[in-house]
Image (cartoon, rainbow, N blue to C red):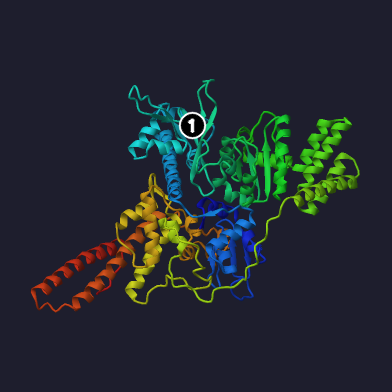
Amino acid sequence: MRISNEITERIKQAADIVEVVGDFVSLKKRGSNYTACCPFHNEKSPSFNVNPVRQIYKCFGCGAAGDSIKFVMDIEGISYGEALRHLAQKYNIEVEEEQQTPEEVLRQNERDSLYIVLNFAQKYYQNLLMEHEEGQSIGLSYFRNRGFNDPTIKSFGLGYSLTDWDGLTKEAAKKGYNPELLEKAGLALHKEGDAQANRATRYYDRFRGRVIFPIHNVSGKVIAFGARILSADKSQPKYINSPETEVYHKSKILYGIYQAKNAIRQEDVCYLVEGYTDVISLHQAGIQNVAASSGTSLTEEQIKLIARFTNNITILYDGDAAGIKAALRGLDMVLEEGLNVSLVTLPDGEDPDSYVYKVGAEGFKKHVQQATKDFITFKTEMLLKDAGDNPFKRAEAINEIVTSITKISDPIKRQIFFKRTADLMKMDEQTLISEGNKHLRRREDKAAEKPTQSKPKDRLRERPQEPTDIHFSDNFIEEEFGILVEDSVPNSVPNVAPKHEPPTDLFKQRLYFQEQAFVKLLILHGQTELETGISLCRYLLHEIGEISFENQLFDLVLNIFRQRFGLGEIPSTDYFLSHIDPDIQRFSIDLCTSKHHLSENWEKHDIVVPTDEELLHEIAFKKILRLKMAYSATKMKDLLNQMGKITGNSDEEFAQIMEVQRQYKFYKNINDLAAKELGTVVPGY
C-alpha cells in the first residue's frame, strides 16, 4: 500500500514549512527567516532556523535539517508515509492508498515523459523566436513592441510557433518523441487515417503561427502553453491554450507563480491580474510579486497556492463595473481561506500592461497604494452605489455584505468590518452583528448535520533510540529506481552525524573534499548556463567523463545528475532540498545554509564581495582541475602501494610492474598538467 505520487506532490506543495514547524515550536521572525530554540536538543539561545523561501529548516546546534515532511517524521518519530498522512490531514487532502498496478507504474513513467517533451517544446519554440526568420520578423517584433527585453523573454521562456502544420511534430520525431506522446502533452492533434485509401493517421501541431507563453508549475517545470494569434484572421480565436493533461490542471495553477513566488514572500502580497502580458510587463518593471488567473475566476486550489507564500492578495481590475461585480461574488472563498483580499481599479481604458508602460513602475506603485481598498469596503461602496435609494436593493446589498463578513474566521476582523460597514451604510452596528450571527448559526447547523469522520487515535510521540544502519530509505529507492517498498520506520534521528564524514587518510581526505566541492557546484548551480546552450551541469559532467566518486553519497548524487541529464533535464536545488533520502537532503541543506552572513556595513563602505554566480566559470574550471589532481594523486598512491607488494621474480610479476608503471605515468601526467594550470607545486610521492 502506498500514497500516490500525485497526492504526495499535493501534500508537499500544501505543507508550508513555517506553518508545520509553528504547530510545534514558537517561531520569531528574524529578517526573511524564522528562529526558535531547537525542539531536538536542549538549548537556551535559539539556533534553529526556518527558511520560508527554500521551505527548509536547519539547526546550527545539533545539525537537524529537512523539509516539512522530515520535520514531522523527526518530531513525531514516525515513518515517511505516516508523516505524509499527518500533513494530508492537516491540509484536508484526501488520501486514497492502494497497491500500485503495472498500469500505474506506466502512468508515472508517462508523466515523466510529458515533462520532458513539454520542456523540449518550450526550447523549440524559443529557438524559433530568436533564430528563425519568421519567428524574428513576427514573434520577436511583437514582443519588442510590447517592450519585452531579452532577459524577460528568457525568464518566461517565450517563443513562437511557425505557420507550418507540423513543424514541431516533425522536429520532435527527429528527436525520438512519438506523436502519441505529443498528443497526450496537448502539443499535437490528429486526423484519423483512411483505411480504404491506405492513409495513415496524420498528426499536426496544435499551435501554429502564434506567439507562445509557457506555463510553469510552482517548481518551474513547463506543464502547458498559451498561444496568441497575431494575424487579423477573425475565424481563429485570439488565444488558445493547452488542454487538461496528466500534468496540467488549469484550476490548480496561476500563470507566473514560479517567477513570482519568492517576491510574493518578500513583499508579503500577491498582485493578481488577468493576462499573460500583464504579468510579464509588471515583472519587467520590477513589480515581480504578480501572477495571473488567466481570465478565469479564482478557484479554491489557486487561493491555497497563493496562501503558501502570503496571506495578502491585491486584485488589479481593468474590467467594467458589471464584470467587477460578477467577479466579486467569487471572492468570498478567499475570505474563507483566511486571506486578506484587497482590490484596485485602474483608470478607464487601462490594464496593468498598458498602465505600467504609461506611468512607469513608481507611478504604478503609487496608484496601487492610493487606490487599494479592502474587499469589504470595495464591495460595500459598489453595491450601495448600484442600489441608490431603492430600499429593496439596499437590503439585498446589506445582506450580501453581511454574508461576506461572516466568511472571515477571525472574530476581531469580523468586528472591525461590521463597524466599518455600519459607518458606510449609516446604520446600527448591532443590527449587522445580529444578522451576521444568524448566518453563522445557520452555517454551524448545516455543518452539524453532516456525518463527522472519526479522528485517528493519538500517536505516542516516541523517538527511536538508535538510527538504523540502512543508508538509503525505502522511499528513496522507490523514488529513484521505481521499486515499490512498503512504508518503513524512520531511518534516522535528526541529530545523528551525517554518513559522509571525511576519511582520515590524507590522500583520501583531499579527494573527499574535492568530490564534495564538485557535487556542491552541481546541486547549487547545475542549471546555470555558462554560455548559451551550455549549462554548468553539462560542462562538469563532460569534463570528468565516466569516473566514479569514492564517497558513496557523492557518487549517488553524481549519478542522479547523469541519469536526469541523460533524460534531458537537470535536477534543481529544490529537488535535493526536499529529497526523500535523509542523507541527501541533510547534505543539500548544509550546502544552502550558513550560520554567518556578511555584515551590512561592508556595503556601506563600498566593499564588494563577488558572488559564486559571478565567478562561476572560473570556479568550475578550478574545481575540475583540483578534482583531477586529488583523484590522480590517490590513484598514484594506490599504485605505489601495489608496486611495493610485487617482487618481480617472475615474468608475470615483471609484466605487472610494467603495467603499474604505465598507469602511474598516466596519472602522473594528469596530475602535472592540472598542477601547471593551477600554478600548484606537486608534492613528491
- Quarter of the image where the C terminus is located: bottom left
Report if residue 462 is visible in the image.
yes
How many numbered circles does the render carry?
Answer: 1
Q: At 38% across and 56% down in the image, what residue appears? A: 618
Q: Does residue 349 appear to the left or right of 564 in the view shown?
A: right
Would you place residue 496 above or below residue 599 in this image?
Answer: below
Report if residue 16 is visible in the image.
no
Q: Residue 247 placed where, x, y %?
A: 50, 44
Task: List the single residue furthest toward the right.
Answer: 428
User: How dense is the environment of label 1, judged by Cα within 10 Å: few (below 14), some, or many (20 and up)?
Assistant: many
Q: At 54% across and 55% down in the image, what residue appears? A: 97
Amino acid type, mark 1: Val
Residue that mark 1 sits on? 211
Q: Residue 96 placed where, x, y %?
A: 56, 53
Q: Residue 284 placed where, x, y %?
A: 56, 41
Q: Does residue 671 appear to the left or right of 20 in the view shown?
A: left
Q: Does residue 258 appear to the left or right of 645 in the view shown?
A: right
Would you place residue 77 above or below residue 379 in this image?
Answer: below
Task: List the single residue furthest toward the left.
Answer: 651
Would you place residue 604 above or below residue 304 in this image?
Answer: below
574 and 624: which is toward the camera: 574
Q: Secondary structure at mark 1?
A: strand
Would you place residue 526 above or below residue 252 in this image?
Answer: below
Q: At 54% across and 25% down in the image, what residue appears? A: 237
